Image: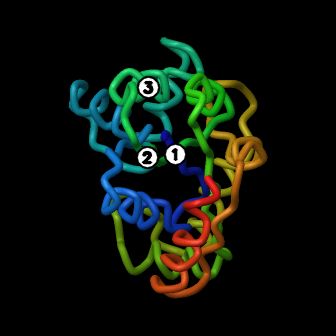
Amino acid sequence: MLVGLTGRNAAGKTTVLQWFQRRGFLTGSCSDSIRAWLSENDIQPTRENLINGGRELRKRHGPGILAEMLLEAFEGENAVIDSIRTPDEVYALRRRNDFVLLEVTADPETRWLRAEARARSGDPMTKEAFLEVERLELVSKDATGQSLIATSALADHTVENNGDLASLERHLGELFPKI
């Protein structure tokens, strides 16, 4: 089985990925490919550089390249892939008959508080900046950019994550047999 995760920043995709990992799934992220490319080019992996690096890789190699690279790495394996941000990545992953896309959601205030608490390098420092960065990721003018609204519309299931960890894990436990 191949599970893909999409959703807005700080919705809890990494936590969901870790839940699958504890059940023996291999893990990866479309962002891993971007981070590797940034490292090869001596570019810091800030959020802005990750976005721009993803655009550049998609422009050079096609809009589904990040997912295609992971498909090769996980061929025939149970795996979960984080940070799916474009419809073309979903289309590439759907080449596997056992692919399921999960959208992880949480309300903006909850996501902002999580982002503020984790304080990742390159994350916006104010709620206003956080929401502005998100707005820019929602719709893309071309196939090289992030398009979270269109990607989420392709989800097979939605995992709501406004509560605590126990609520999320209970929801995942109920959903898993269905997928």
The image shows a total of numbered marks equal to: 3
Look at the numbered disc 1 and give the secondary structure of its residue: strand
Name the kind of residue labelled 1 in the image.
Answer: Val
Q: Is residue 73 left or right of residue 97?
A: left
Name the kind of residue labelled 3 in the image.
Answer: Leu
Residue at the image position 63 percent from the left and 33 percent from the top: 90
Residue at the image position 39 percent from the left and 65 percent from the top: 19
Residue at the image position 69 percent from the left and 41 percent from the top: 147
**Residues packed near mark 3 inside 10 Å, few (<14), some (14 to 19) or many (20 plus):** many
Question: Is the Cβ of the residue at disc 3 closer than 8 Å to that at disc 1?
Answer: no
Which one is nearer the viewer's eye here, 160 or 97?
A: 97
**Residues packed near mark 1 inside 10 Å, few (<14), some (14 to 19) or many (20 plus):** many
Relative to residue 43, is residue 113 depicted above or below? below
Q: Which residue is mark 2?
A: 80
Relative to residue 131, is residue 39 depicted above or below? above
Question: Is the Cβ of the residue at disc 2 closer than 8 Å to that at disc 3?
Answer: no
Look at the numbered disc 2 and give the secondary structure of its residue: strand
What is the C-alpha distance between the residues marked 2 and 1? 5 Å
Question: Is the Cβ of the residue at disc 2 closer than 8 Å to that at disc 1?
Answer: yes
**Residues packed near mark 2 inside 10 Å, few (<14), some (14 to 19) or many (20 plus):** many
Q: Which residue is mark 3?
A: 71
Q: Which numbered dot is residue 52?
A: none
Quarter occupied by residue 36: top left
Q: Which residue is mark 1?
A: 3
Q: Is residue 145 left or right of residue 60?
A: right
